[in-house]
Image (spheres, rainbow, N blue to C red):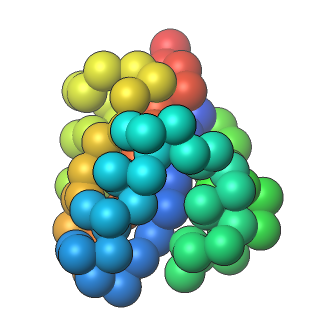
Amino acid sequence: MAKAAAVHILLNSKEEAEQLKQELAQGANFAELAKKHSQCPSGKQGGDLGEFRKGDMVKAFDDVVFKKALLEVQGPVKTQFGYHLIKTLYRS
């Protein structure tokens, strides 16, 4: 079964997600932004979700983690939880 690790920032609006994505593109620290802005409990750990298996997350999230480029900020990705900025650290 495929596994991956990712960090994410969960936000309430697409606009906020796009603003933070621009800040990240300009060199902002992902973990710091996650701690400050993320609506997910993982924000306290800098957005770290740890390792998980394919299928553990909702489909839209899984698709990004298991199909998009590693170590690049993807999103905003809309799920029932809100808008995510996702960076996949590794997958196997």
x then y, percent, for residue 61: 32, 53
Q: Residue at x 24, y 27 (%)?
A: 67
Front residue (pair 92, 26)? 26
- The reply, left or right, for residue 51 in relation to residue 3 is right
Q: Which residue is drawn at 61% across and 62% down?
A: 34
Front residue (pair 45, 49)? 45
Query: Is residue 1 visible from the viewing direction of this image?
Result: no
x then y, percent, for residue 48: 67, 50
| Residue at the bottom extreme of this rendering | 12
- The reply, left or right, for residue 25 in relation to residue 77 is right
Q: Which residue is drawn at 60% across and 60% down?
A: 33
Q: In which quarter of the image is residue 18?
A: bottom left
Q: Residue at x 32, y 64 (%)?
A: 19
x then y, percent, for residue 88: 47, 32
- The reply, left or right, for residue 21 in relation to residue 44 is left
| Residue at the top extreme of this rendering | 92
Front residue (pair 15, 48)? 15
- The reply, left or right, for residue 36 in relation to residue 87 is right
Front residue (pair 38, 6)? 38
8 relative to 28, above or below: below
